[in-house]
Amino acid sequence: MAVSVSQVATWKQRQGASPLVVLTAWDVMSGQIADQAGADIVLVGDSLAMVALGYDTTLPLTLEDMLICAKASRRGVQRALLVVDLPFLSYQPSLEETIRSAGRILKESAAQAVKIEGGHAAVVERVQALVQWGIPVMGHVGLTPQSVNQFGGFRKQGKTEAEADRILAEAQDLEQAGAFSLVLEHIPADLARKISNTLTIPTIGIGAGPHCTGQVLVTADVLGLSPWQPPFAKAYANLRQQAIDAAQQFCDEVRSGQYPG
Ligand code: KIV
């Protein structure tokens, strides 16, 4: 049976529920892989700007780019809940722009929810408005890659007491505003545990230790397809080298006349 927003929102209240599993997608093939592997949520994350489009950060990704990738991913996902990131500058300018961008994502890609980065007052206001208009929202605090320039790199967040208090307060505000789940990225495990114990909605960790309700990784990292991966990611295969070897064998066989034979 397909996974719904309300099932995810109440994940922590379900007796004996297993950890929530989230994988990312950027096209039909990665969507099929994540869905058929059994992920509960497939996230078309804006990490696709780096993974699939070759940018150094997520900032250049446009809403139009995202819609193409979200529609392709949708064609590969049957069972999992499909969540799509709001790209940089598709929600910052105004509340109206936020609703239009999120609405287009749901309308054009048939995703069930959007994800938005940050937890300061302006983001919380946007989450509240989206939820009021029937658009479910996944929050995202800690290392929010769209703020990489502010952070001075993809650095762990919440290491000082003041930062940790701020992130905890943001998490509470986002839950209060109606977010149905919350990504905690690259923060200390103790802080992730505190947030997870405080909130009713599920937390989904990435580089945030073992105490979250669930875990998310970028599928390209899981498959070992990425040329570089963050320190907290785990590769379960080395498909990049296998793919290069297979393609190289084809090149060699064509040049030697072995293929097509
Ligand atoms: O963009 C993304 O893939 C994400 C996940 C890593 C949480 O935001």
Image: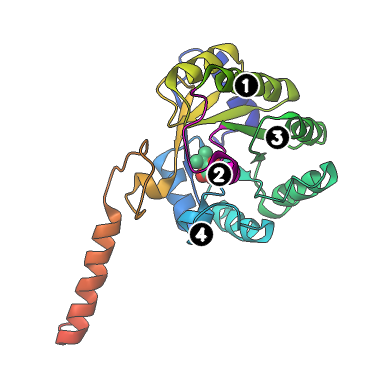
Q: What's the distance in space between the residues labelled 1 and 3, CA to CA?
A: 24 Å
Q: Which residues are magenta?
A: 142-159
Q: Which residue is mark 2?
A: 148
Residue 155 visible within the image: yes
How many residues crowd around disc 2 within 10 Å: few (fewer than 14), some, or many (20 or more)?
some
Q: Secondary structure at mark 3?
A: loop
Residue 152: say if magenta.
Answer: yes
Q: What's the distance in space between the residues labelled 3 and 2, CA to CA?
A: 25 Å
Upstream in sequence: badge 4 or badge 2 = 4
Upstream in sequence: badge 1 or badge 3 = 3
Q: What's the distance in space between the residues labelled 4 and 2, CA to CA?
A: 13 Å
Residue at (75% x, 50% y) in the render: 101
How many residues crowd around disc 4 within 10 Å: few (fewer than 14), some, or many (20 or more)?
some
Q: What's the distance in space between the residues labelled 1 and 2, CA to CA?
A: 18 Å
Upstream in sequence: badge 1 or badge 2 = 2
Of 2 and 185, nearer the camera is 185
Q: Which residue is mark 3?
A: 136
Q: Which residue is mark 4?
A: 55
Upstream in sequence: badge 1 or badge 4 = 4
Q: Quadrant of the N terminus?
A: top right
| Circle nearer the viewer, 4 or 3 | 4
